[in-house]
Image: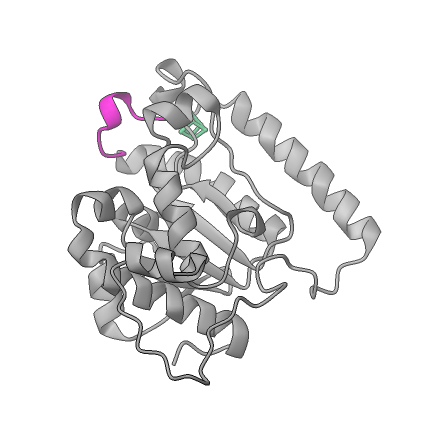
Amino acid sequence: MDTRSRYLQEMGITQWVSRDAGFHSVPGIGVAQDLNTDESDLIQNDQLMADLLTQVETCRQCGLHRTRYTTVFGVGPIPANLMIVGEAPSAEDDRQGIPFVGRVGQLLASMLFSIGFKLEDVYIANALKCRPPDDRDPLAEELAHCNPFLLQQIERIQPKVILALGKVAVQSLLETNESPGQLRNSGQVRAVAGVPVIATYHPAYLLQSPAAKPESWKDLYRARQLLINGSSA
Ligand code: SF4
């Protein structure tokens, strides 16, 4: 069994493949090499991102600054065609200052690999930059305070598609009470700052509810189609 087949199996996807059919990774669809950005823009963008990082590291706009060990800003190439937005740092993320470490991160890597992406080609951030104590749900006021940081990240990363993982990410990005399932069933692709948002389950939920993996894979596939064709159909 090849690597991709193993990842598809992990995502609960049964493959029915004709002898001629192939599902290949698409070089460059993750890293934004095709963006028309010159070097001076990139340097300026780097500086803007560094300034934003400093703002986050010193932020005390909500009570979470009192309980965080560190801030978790985000990781990945700038610009990037695909941006992933999760909910909030886990305990391990809080210790390391990196989003999606541990089993959740491993599953996320598998999910991305199953649609032809590598983790390092994707920019990954959370709606909240500081961990809520005992991993409680983020409060609306905390999300409201942190949201401008996320919007500025999106502006600088210039993604073509955003994958929102879980209800909190969806609510923070789209300012809606709808769940990822409701958005999927509506058949609409909503956008933030002009960037289409595909909503799906958070990998932490998929670890507890593996039966939802095939549905999640369909969402990821829609994101891939949007990137390649500009349409999720
Ligand atoms: S969660 Fe966001 S708004 Fe709250 S202290 Fe951390 S960086 Fe600031």
Looking at the picture, how far across and down is residue 206, in whole percent? 23, 48
x, y percent for residue 215: 24, 64
Q: Is residue 191 left or right of residue 168?
A: right
Q: Which residue shows up at 37% across the image and 71% down it?
A: 189
Give the quadrant of the N terminus.
bottom left
Viewer-closest of 152 and 203: 203
Question: Could you say where residue 109 lies in the image, as x and y percent from the top left?
Answer: 43, 48
View extreme (front): residue: 1
Can you say which quadrant of the picture contains the C terminus? bottom left
Q: Is residue 49 left or right of residue 96?
A: right
Q: In the image, is residue 224 above or below residue 104?
A: below
Q: Is residue 52 magenta?
A: no
Question: Which residues, given as a range, are shown in magenta?
Answer: 131-138
Q: Nearer the viewer, residue 111 or 55?
A: 111
The residue under the point 62% across, 65% down is 27
Residue at left offset 61%, top offset 26% = 54
The answer to whether residue 9 shows anywhere in this view is yes
Quadrant in which ligand 1 is drawn: top left
Q: Is residue 62 visible?
A: no
Q: Judge whether 138 appears above or below 208 on screen.
A: above
**Which colour scheme appears in the figure?**
one colour
- Report the predominant secondary structure element of the magenta stretch: loop
